[in-house]
Image: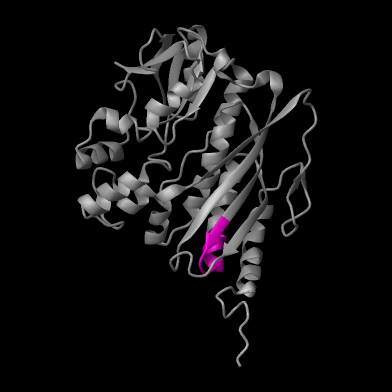
Amino acid sequence: MNKIDYKSAGVDINRGYEAVQKMKKYVESTYIKGVLGSIGGFGGMFELPKGYEEPVLVCGTDGVGTKLQLAFMTDRHESIGIDCVAMCVNDIACIGAKPLFFLDYIGTGVLEPNQVENIVKGISIGCKEAMCAIIGGETAEMPNFYKKGEYDLAGFSVGIVEKSKIITSDKLKQDNVLIGVSSSGIHSNGYSLVRKLCFDVQKLNVDTFISQLNKTLGEELLTPTKIYVRLIQNLINKFDINGIAHITGGGWIENIPRILSPDLKAVVTIKNHKISPIFNLLKEWGNLEDKDMYNTFNMGIGLVVAVDKSYADEVLKEIQKTDDAYIIGKVEKRNGEEEIEFI
């Protein structure tokens, strides 16, 4: 009888070793003060930074969703790694936390070392932009569980903030001004609808050149999510920020109200900011109404910052040193109305 081993069952341990060696340089390039140990241990270690009186750890986890299908279609995997980092660190940064470290999980049917290397390369780019370290991760090879060439990707990040400086809805007040900060595109949300409109309805492919975008459809759809950590850290060090909303799945309608207390509402306008061309195309291709769009996509605004009206212009000017930004609304008293009102 022939030997039936792990490799014959579909799991090649040597590919795993090769993948670790290929990703090692990217992981180590993210190391910052506080990292203990090195890649390959049974757990990642990070020493808490000194100088905090009441340090609070803030955690966030997320995946990339069906945007992964674009990576499979184009065989481009680097930007997906950036997305994975962004979706985690942007969330915890909204609470005022500075990201410390990041861990990733990659599950696949057949481990392809070059593919994993490119994913982790993107993760390292995202982590360096977020000023945090990769201290661990996991690659799981599960034969016949995923289609050939496909995988799933998820991440987990931990940050730190002084307890007295946590940004909560308690800080938001009536007449606060809402400042919208530009996105880099669709980011990592709404891709089930995006793929349906682009590939099923319009019958386009990833190599189709879209004149309104001045690039191919694949290039546009794979644009990585903007990482806002440096911007947020700069703002909270210079100003008293009352609320920050990361505009992800659910668009403006779901995410802006998340920073409001029950007695307040957001009054926003859709005419004060620049809408990325891709959103106009999606609206046309789907015959969608504004409410549909603002309840699904970020519409060109990836972050909303709430500040006191007395220094809103100063905050706006500070943001505009690095990002496009616009005053998109204000906070008002809520008397039974919807949490968000469009004007």
Query: Which corner quadrant holds the N terminus?
Result: bottom right
Q: Position of residue 153 (x, y in %)?
A: 52, 53
Residue 123 in the image: x percent, y percent? 57, 50
Say which residue appears at 44% left-offset and 59% top-offset. 76
Q: Residue at x 56, y 77 (%)?
A: 9
In the image, residue 32 sits, relative to residue 266, either above or below, namely below
**Residue farthest to the bottom?**
1
Q: How many marks?
A: 0
Which is more toward the observer, 96 or 317?
96
The spot of residue 149 in percent (x, y) is 45, 66
Give the colour scheme of this rendering: one colour
The structure residue drawn at horizontal position 54% and vertical position 33%, both measured from the top left corner, is 91
Q: Is 117 inside the magenta-drawn segment?
A: yes
- Identify the residue at horizontal 24%, vertical 53% (top origin): 200
Q: Is residue 296 above or below residue 13?
A: above
Instruction: List the single residue furthest toward the front.
Output: 1
Which image quadrant for residue 139?
bottom right
* Residue 339 percent across, percent down from the top left: 40, 18
Q: Is residue 206 magenta?
A: no
* Vertical arrangement, residue 156 with respect to residue 327, above or below: below
Q: Is residue 257 above or below residue 41?
A: above
Classify residue 129 as left or right of residue 55.
left
> From which residue to which does the magenta span run?
106-118
Quadrant housing the C terminus: top left
In this rendering, position of residue 56 left or right of residue 171: right
